[in-house]
Amino acid sequence: MSRRDRAVIFDVQRFSVHDGPGIRTVVFFKGCALDCAWCHNPEAVRPTPELTYWRDRCISGCRECVEVCPETALFDRIEARIAWSRCTHCGLCAQTCPADALVMVGREVGQRELLDEVVKDREFFATSGGGVTFSGGEPVLHSAFLGDFLPLARAEGLHLAIETCGGAPWELLEPLLPSLDLVLYDLKVMDTALHQRLTGKDNVQIHEVLRRLLARGIPVEVRMPVVPGHNTDDGNIRATAAFLTGLGVDRLSLLPYNHLWEAKLRALDTTRRPLGIRAPEPDFYRELESRFEASGIQPYR
Amino acid sequence: MLETSKGCVAQADAWVPAPDPVCEMPPRLSRLREALLDAPYSLCSQKAELLTQWFRTHDPGPPLTRLLAPWHFALMRGAMTRNLAEGQPQTRLQLRASTALQRLYRGLDRDGEPLVVRFARGLAHVLEQMALTVYDDELIVGNLSSQRIGAPIHPDFGGVLLLPELRSLATRRVNPLRTSEEQIRRLEEEIFPYWFTRSVMARTPLHSSDPTLANTLVRGRDFLLTQFAGISHVTPDYPAVLSKGFTGILGDIEAARRRAPDAESQAFYQAAAICAQAAIRYGARWSRHLRAQSARQSDPARAAELADLAGIFERVPARPARSFHEALQSLFIAHVMVHQESFQHGVSFGRIDQYLYPYYARDVQAGALTRERAVELLGCFLGKAAEQLPLFNAMATEFFSGLSSASGLTLGGSDASGRDASNELTGTILQAYDFMRLRQPNLHLRLHDGSPLELRHLAMETLKKGGGMPGLFNDATIVPALERGGATSQDASDYAIVGCVEWGVPYKSFPAAGAAFVSLPAILDDVLHGRDAAAAGDQSSGRLHGGVASARFADMDALWAALREAMAARIRHAVDGNESIEAAHRLYRPTPMLSLIVGGCVESGRDVTAGGAHYDSTGMQGVGLADVADSLAAIERVVFEEKRASFSELVAAVDADFDGHEALRSRLQLKVAKYGEDVGAAERWAERVASAWCELVAGHRSGRGGNYAAGFWTMTTHVGFGRRLGALPSGRRRGQPLSDGISPTNGSDRRGPTASLAAAARVCGNGVANGLALNEKLDPWFVAGEAGTRMMDDLTRGYFRCGGQQVQYNVLDAATLLDAKLHPERHRGLVVRISGYSAYFNDLTDEMKDDIIARTAHAGPPSSCASGPVCQMPPRDSQ
């Protein structure tokens, strides 16, 4: 599915300070190997560019989009602007919309174009020990593209990290490793059946890929996206700690839960439903950290 | 050892380790700070009264002038009130008649003693008569004005601009000043009527080719010329005062005088000698006064302090300083004397951690000075420097909000060989500032590759507490800019900041750095409407609805050519006006006191106003750079590339302030990447406009013999110009503030600080001879902790590696600012960075308060995204 010369990304975010060391630029690839119930970037799941509709920005009386839509999928009423069933995500309306109410998420980039974007902050990478992180979606699904891109970026002297859920086959990740300085590796939940239910896939391969990765000796930072009530029970914490200890890993990054993704759903062509989890208080994380510590795992702070 | 968490001064290995870091604010400094924050602001007319007294006695003027002037004054007063207070332009007839009368007065002036000598004698009289006041707890004395915090009026320059507002000064809403009935009476009846025929303000029109210049300036749309008020903006050779004393300087004057070639320089030397002698007598006066105060003092500890000070004044400023305390006192009293001559703006201290260090080190080594004592003395000094205000009328208050006298004080940096020049005193001064946290002086820190990590982190820690100081300057890009401007590399490497951000060679330059501010978007507006920018000053704001006129731009090249030509014309207009002001200074208001302590003047026998300084230049600032760049990028994209609107449609929408054109405005604003997003097109335009500006400005020479020097700093002129300008193609609405300095427009830095810093670095360059200011606002949560300190340092160094020249950080959260606007009483000492200077938030106009609040904070609340830009808006259709 992945092409060598082009890839669909949905953002290049500069000045990221949470995805690896220093000041980083994060490239978000579109398309994912999992389908997590709490996905923070629901607009990243579909592998192709897609239309989003942000009703609050729409200018009343403006109907430029209605006029350009070749599928008659757009209507005059701001509250019921789109018939998603007819929309082909061609993007003509987004080009026309003066208000950024209709916005395409995802665009194709070529190797050179992406390189030009990620080198913009190279001086800041240099002063902060930062670099570029490839995220998504699941960047490993773009292995063919990255296989060419990473050596180019490396030749520019950039520190390179990838952020993966491990849901892609080892054969796709493996060829990328020689050009990578760091792998940020997500573990969601230990119980295989629960993993299947929450993410659409079991975690057998995910655990296997992590094992192989660690065996290669490349720096790996294991991370757990905290989903209160889903992976924060004692059973999961103990199981995660035991699994990591077994692999010789004694540290873990806890990624705080953010419920803002639910607000995006309204703008998307999706059937995904909100989970209704409130963002927990900071005390919750302190307590969580100490429970991991008690199990022999030191969280990164 | 670095103990920033406790607020202790950090020490780098490269520094002399200080034995006793000061962690607690000395109680004396707490009391001084409170007293300063409590002191009311007052109008000071002491210098005006004393100088006028001397002149009315010794130089009353010819009888015919005395006969005509009161009548002329009364007539003009009415016209001036209407012009200044109501914005009603003066008629050509009025202006011509007034100029004719001024020409007559000038012709009637009798030959007497040379003018420069008269002004020297006048200054000597002021120094002999001015009140001496010692306030509680002070260890450094001297009075910049007759009140604790005063705004002196200078009738010999442009003080008459205050005439229509004198009676409302005490009750005006923004920056009220205490006045007295008697003070106002004297100004109205004795002082202004005298200077009305001979001030800089009065005589400027005699040298201007634009008869309606006064109207252009009051209109405040196109450009501002500030030097009616005085030139100031200079770093005097205070180190020479410390090392030679005025006795030594007097010796230099006498030696040079014997070689003086002509009557003009003879006159200058005579004046300079009078000033130096006056300075020596002034010190002696202080000594006697302090001795008497000490004798009257019931508290023996305080009596001893005053007696010590009396002893110090027996020595300085007449003779070379020997101790740190003598040096600081000598420095401050010289600063006081300079301000009895000319306007309170931008008179700066230079690299004080360099020239004070020998005194400091010697005392410390001899065991005569502890670090606590040094901090205490420095705190007293910083407090004194905050005691004065510039006097602004209502219009100037809008353009220069915040009451900053902008006395710059430069720290750190490298020496001529590129080695780090910072020392223990550098950190000690930062520590003293951290305790005082007053709105001025302006702290500036020079940084280079060899700046110690501990010093950089100490600066960031200081910035993190708010207040916006120190401003940060990049040696690697500023030194070459000065060399290109003509400075030797030795001199360039010794640069210091004048006023806000104006880099220059200290101690021997007369940079006139704040001379002119030009609205760049107003030029673009004229071009879009087919108005002739050269004639713009002469029109009474009638807007031609120029859809047709502007249709002549077939492409961006045509538009750019017209804009460049219009910029050149506007610069010529402003230069012409400024030259007339500078001619008036040169011919009618020399400043011998300042001249004798600006390097080059004593050697050349010429006043600073006549080009006596070793280096000369005149600063001209471009205001609203980002607005022009954004507008050009928007026109290029929407009109020429996408053809979604015609030129005429665009101009019609702009003229309608986008009423009924919401979709077009939205497209211009949202669908075109703005300067600061670092996407490309807007930055290219910013670069193009900036380099054209620098080139065109540098093509002019001043009457003093120096080049005009381009800058991009705004004070709050971006608010004043913005209020007087219609909508712009960038989507900015009528009346909204323009962008400040080289900062992106508010809200256009949404791609984070690296993008806006990298974008800003592109307009920095060797052509920027007069400084620039970049405001970055950072949220306190973001820079919290050691990681935040490192982050600020990493950002700064990254920006500097990109070619950046200056940046200033405002670390404040919007909630605090909003609360301060609602409850000023709760935020008395809240200092915010404005442009190249800081001010108490409470001293700002409402518009400026809103502007500060609107300046985007980078990055929202902590992103807790598992992955991805959850907290961001969705990415938009990139170019």
Image: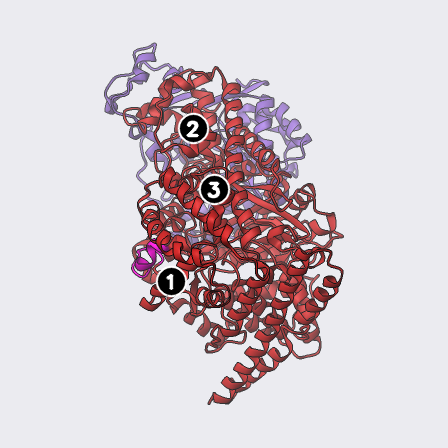
Residue B875, percent from left and from top: 43, 29
Query: How far is the residue under mark 2 from the one under mark 1?
Result: 41 Å
* Looking at the image, residue B833 lies above or below residue B804: below
Residue B537, percent from left and from top: 43, 34
Q: Which of A234 and B536 is in front in this view?
A: B536
Name the image quarter holding residue B619: top right
* Looking at the image, residue B377 lies above or below residue A101: below
The quadrant of the rendering that contains the N terminus of chain B is bottom right
Q: Mark 2 lies on which chain?
A: B
Q: Mark 2 points at which residue?
A: B526
Q: Name the residue under label 3.
A: A224
Name the image quarter holding residue B43: bottom left
Q: Is residue B164 magenta?
A: yes
Chain shown in purple: A
For the residue carrying disc 3, how many other residues have a C-alpha within 10 Å: few (<14), some (14-19), or many (20+)? Answer: some
Q: Name the residue under label 1.
A: B187
Residue type indicated by callout 3 = Met
Query: How far is the residue under mark 3 from the one under mark 1?
Result: 75 Å
Rendered colour, chain B? red
Query: How far is the residue under mark 2 from the one under mark 3?
Result: 59 Å
Q: Residue B637 carries which label?
A: none
Residue type indicated by callout 2 = Asp
* Looking at the image, residue B676 lies above or below residue B549: below
Q: Magenta span covers which residues?
A: B163-175
Specify which label sits upstream in the sequence, 2 or 1.
1
Q: Which chain carries label 3?
A: A
Q: Is mark 2 on a helix, strand or loop?
A: helix
In the rendered structure, the answer to whether residue B259 lies left or right of residue A3 reads right
Q: Which of A20 and B548 is in front in this view?
A: B548
Residue A277, percent from left and from top: 32, 41
